Amino acid sequence: MANERTLSIIKPDAVAKNVIGGIFSMIEAADLKVVATRMIHLTEDQAKAFYAVHRERPFYNDLVSFMTAGPVVVSVLEGQDAIAKYRKVMGATNPAQADNGTIRKAFAENIERNAVHGSDAPETAAMEVAFFFPESEIRSR
Ligand code: IDP
Ligand code: MG
């Protein structure tokens, strides 16, 4: 298992619910470290670019509207097998299918308003981390 970095976004629905701390607690309980974090309000251009891979999907415009509706918390998580581990802690995209004990089971409302984003592979993790954080803002420890 490699020591990895992955990008987490606590989405506008979860920030509005005031569960940032609850989500960070679940991240830390899984032995992942927050090595960079910032609250931002995504612009439409940023949300479109971040989710460009989904631009042909029917939900793309709604997703961009949702992600720009309020502030989000972007973070870099680090740890052994961090990419797959965080996906497991997040739970399934559709919270109706998410396992007990996952972030989405605990906090997500539906398949769109699903509380968190996490990178899905080493290549996307590297791109997504660099999208929000210069290396100088990441504190590996
Ligand atoms: P993921 O976040 O679990 O990786 P993706 O398939 O990459 O899921 O989709 C990105 C985001 O787009 C989801 O987290 C969710 O917010 C939204 N999304 C995915 N599928 C649907 C859908 O069928 N309807 C509405 N929104 C969706
Ligand atoms: Mg995805």
Image (tube, rainbow, N blue to C red):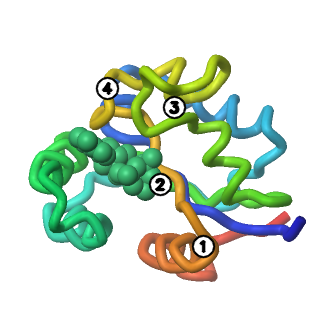
Amino acid at the residue labelled 3: Ile
What is the spatial separation of the Cα atoms under label 4 and label 1, in whole angstroms? 33 Å
Tell me if 132 is positioned left or right of 138 in this view: left
Residue 86 pos. (x, y %): 66, 48
Q: Residues within 10 Å of mark 2 (few under 14, many from 20)?
A: many
Q: Earlier in the sequence, mark 2 or mark 3?
A: 3
Tell me if 67 is positioned left or right of 9 in this view: left
Disc number at residue 137? 1
Element assignment for label 4 = loop
- From the viewer's perspective, is residue 73 above or below residue 19? below
Does residue 71 show up? no
Q: Which residue is mark 2?
A: 74
- Quarter the C terminus occupies: bottom right
What is the spatial separation of the Cα atoms under label 1 and label 3, in whole angstroms? 20 Å
Q: Which residue is mark 4?
A: 110
Amino acid at the residue labelled 4: Asn
- From the viewer's perspective, is residue 42 above or below residue 46? above
